[in-house]
């Protein structure tokens, strides 16, 4: 599998104009979040939802992880001990 060198946020057509406008307006914002998440993972760091929220304001990192996986990155996860299923992601 080949990896993309850049994340592609091609906005897919939505079923209504309001959600389409929101997707278009958020494109740059999500690209920055994905780039931050990827840099952190490539540095060997494990990222949890708490870390993503505290350090970069990412409310739901699952969407960012999904985008990275879609781009071809193999991202693994483990459950954080002592939680009710909270995950941390790593390469």
Image (tube, rainbow, N blue to C red):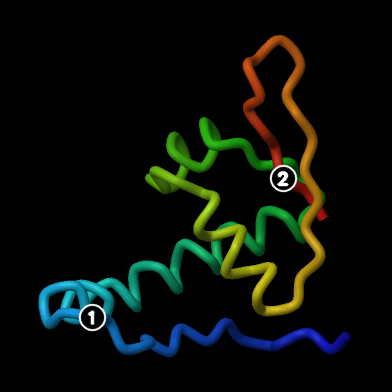
Residue that extends furthest to the top in the rendered view of this protein:
82
Tag 2–tag 1 contact (CB < 8 Å):
no
Residue located 67% across and 34% down the image: 87
Residue that extends furthest to the left in the rendered view of this protein:
18
Q: Nearer the viewer, residue 45 or 68?
A: 68
Q: How many marks?
A: 2
Q: In the displayed structure, does residue 55 sit left or right of residue 16?
A: right
In this picture, is 12 found above or below 29?
Answer: below
Between the residue at mark 2 and the residue at mark 1, the CA separation in whole angstroms equals 32 Å
Crowd tier of the residue under label 1, counting other residues whose Cα lies within 10 Å: few below 14, some 14–19, many 20 or above? few
Q: Nearer the viewer, residue 73 or 19?
A: 19
In this picture, is 86 found above or below 61?
Answer: above
Residue tagged 2:
89
Q: Specify which label sits upstream in the sequence, 2 or 1.
A: 1
Q: Nearer the viewer, residue 43 or 13?
A: 13
- Helix, strand, or loop for circle 2? strand
The percent coordinates of residue 56 (x first, y second) are: 44, 47
| Residue 57 position by quadrant | top left
Residue located 27% across and 76% down the image: 23
Residue located 75% across and 45% down the image: 45
Query: Which quadrant: the C terminus?
Result: bottom right
The percent coordinates of residue 44 (x first, y second) are: 81, 50
Crowd tier of the residue under label 2, counting other residues whose Cα lies within 10 Å: few below 14, some 14–19, many 20 or above? many
Residue tagged 1:
15
The percent coordinates of residue 14 (x first, y second) are: 27, 82
Query: Which quadrant: the N terminus?
Result: bottom right
Of tags 2 and 1, which is closer to the observer? 1
Residue located 63% across and 16% down the image: 84
- Helix, strand, or loop for circle 1? loop
């Amino acid at each position: 599998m080949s990896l993309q060198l850049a994340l592609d946020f091609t906005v897919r057509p939505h079923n209504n104009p309001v959600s389409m406008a929101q997707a278009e307006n958020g494109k740059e914002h999500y690209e920055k979040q994905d780039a931050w998440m990827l840099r952190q993972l490539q540095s060997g760091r494990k990222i949890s939802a708490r870390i993503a929220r505290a350090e970069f304001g990412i409310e739901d990192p699952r969407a960012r992880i999904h985008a990275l996986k879609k781009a071809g990155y193999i991202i693994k996860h483990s459950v954080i001990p002592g939680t009710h299923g909270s995950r941390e992601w790593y390469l």
